[in-house]
């Protein structure tokens, strides 16, 4: 086994073992009802050659193969306003934890995937396909257990990460989204949310990550203005236990645009 594959398999196996007690092997009633899991990858690239290799890999190999395995609606994005060479963001949904744990073994047996993905999968160390991959594993929120794909119109996406000072603050923010109606406010105001996910494995934990979409930058500004002045949001956010100062320690917002092969 190549070192890169071995390291990846070891990390995934070890990380999965650490979260199994938390999510009960995905056997709760909610998981059985269809709660999705997501892998969010961020590729750091040094030039356009690497960008093309990664984009071609998803278009020609990864997306078709993952679709065959049951992972639908795979999103692949570049930064709308990159600082230098763009990063590539890939969002891969899984129907269950078992699907995630078994995906690499199944891909390794997929001849078509290996042939079409060869330029990426077997790139030499002197000319790697990417500089590094950062990967997070997310569990969909109870109030939005499945991804919702927007219309295939020209659009931009905003990926937002809310970091928390403690695990208890993170759970309270989850409660605010799920039980106190924050997700419903996003939907009612036309933010067209794609997914909401609690980060089980990844950097900057504890945090949650979600994605919303707009027609353009003007629409983004108008939507957030409407959100801030929405009576229901003001009522919810005025509850002392839901104050942002208590629950959110840092927000990261990244504007993205889909590549041609993206299914989101």
Image (spheres, rainbow, N blue to C red):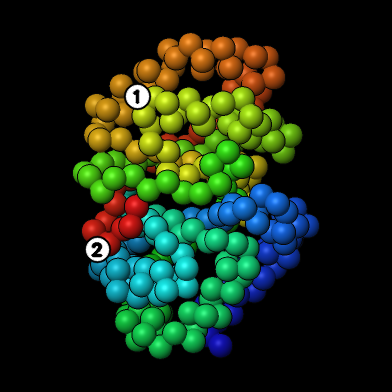
**Label 1: few (<14), some or many (≥20) within 10 Å?**
some
Instruction: Residue 105 in the image: state x and y as whole percent.
Output: 56, 80
Q: Residue at x 51, y 15 (%)?
A: 232
Toward which corner of the image does residue 64 lie, by quadrant? bottom left
Mark 1 secondary-structure assignment: helix
- Is 63 situated left or right of 139 in this image? left
The residue where tag 1 is placed is: 223
Which is more N-terminal, label 2 or label 1?
2
* Label 2: element kind: helix
Return the mark for residue 199.
none
Q: Is residue 259 left or right of residue 190?
A: left
Q: Is residue 117 left or right of residue 27?
A: left
Q: Tell me the residue at 40%/88% (across/down).
A: 111
Residue, x 46% and y 60% (percent of image)? 92
**Which one is in front in this view, the residue at disc 1 or the one at disc 2?**
1
Q: Position of residue 204 (x, y in %)?
A: 59, 45
Q: Position of residue 249 (x, y in %)?
A: 60, 30
Image quarter where the N terminus lies is bottom right
Q: Is 12 above or below relative to 231? A: below
Q: Nearer the viewer, residue 183 or 229?
A: 183
**Residue identifier under label 2:** 48
Picture quadrant of residue 242: top right
Residue shown at the point (48%, 79%) measured from the top left: 107
User: Up-down: is 218 above or below 166?
Assistant: above
Work out whether residue 100 or residue 11 is closer to the camera in this orientation and state it.
Answer: 100
Which residue is the extreme one toward the left? 154
Nearer-the-camera pick, 34 or 214: 34
């Amino acid at each position: 086994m190549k070192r890169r594959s071995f390291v990846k398999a070891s990390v995934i196996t070890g990380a999965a073992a650490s979260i199994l007690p938390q999510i009960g092997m995905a056997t709760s009633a909610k998981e059985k009802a269809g709660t999705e899991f997501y892998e969010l990858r961020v590729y750091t690239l040094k030039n356009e050659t690497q960008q093309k290799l990664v984009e071609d890999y998803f278009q020609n190999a990864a997306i078709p193969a993952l679709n065959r395995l049951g992972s639908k609606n795979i999103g692949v994005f570049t930064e709308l306003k990159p600082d230098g060479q763009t990063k590539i963001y890939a969002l891969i949904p899984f129907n269950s934890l078992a699907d995630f744990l078994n995906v690499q073994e199944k891909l390794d047996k997929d001849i078509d995937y290996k042939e079409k993905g060869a330029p990426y999968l077997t790139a030499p160390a002197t000319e790697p396909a990417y500089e590094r991959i950062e990967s997070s594993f997310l569990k969909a929120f109870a109030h939005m257990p499945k991804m919702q794909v927007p219309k295939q119109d020209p659009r931009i996406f905003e990926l937002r990460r809310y970091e928390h000072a403690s695990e208890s603050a993170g759970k309270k923010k989850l409660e605010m989204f799920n039980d106190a109606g924050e997700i419903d406010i996003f939907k009612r105001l036309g933010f067209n949310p794609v997914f909401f996910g609690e980060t089980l494995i990844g950097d900057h934990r504890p945090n949650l990550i979600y994605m919303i979409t707009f027609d353009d930058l003007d629409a983004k500004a108008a939507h957030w203005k409407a959100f801030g002045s929405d009576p229901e949001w003001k009522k919810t956010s005025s509850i002392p236990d839901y104050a942002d100062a208590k629950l959110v320690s840092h927000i990261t917002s990244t504007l993205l645009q889909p590549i041609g092969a993206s299914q989101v």
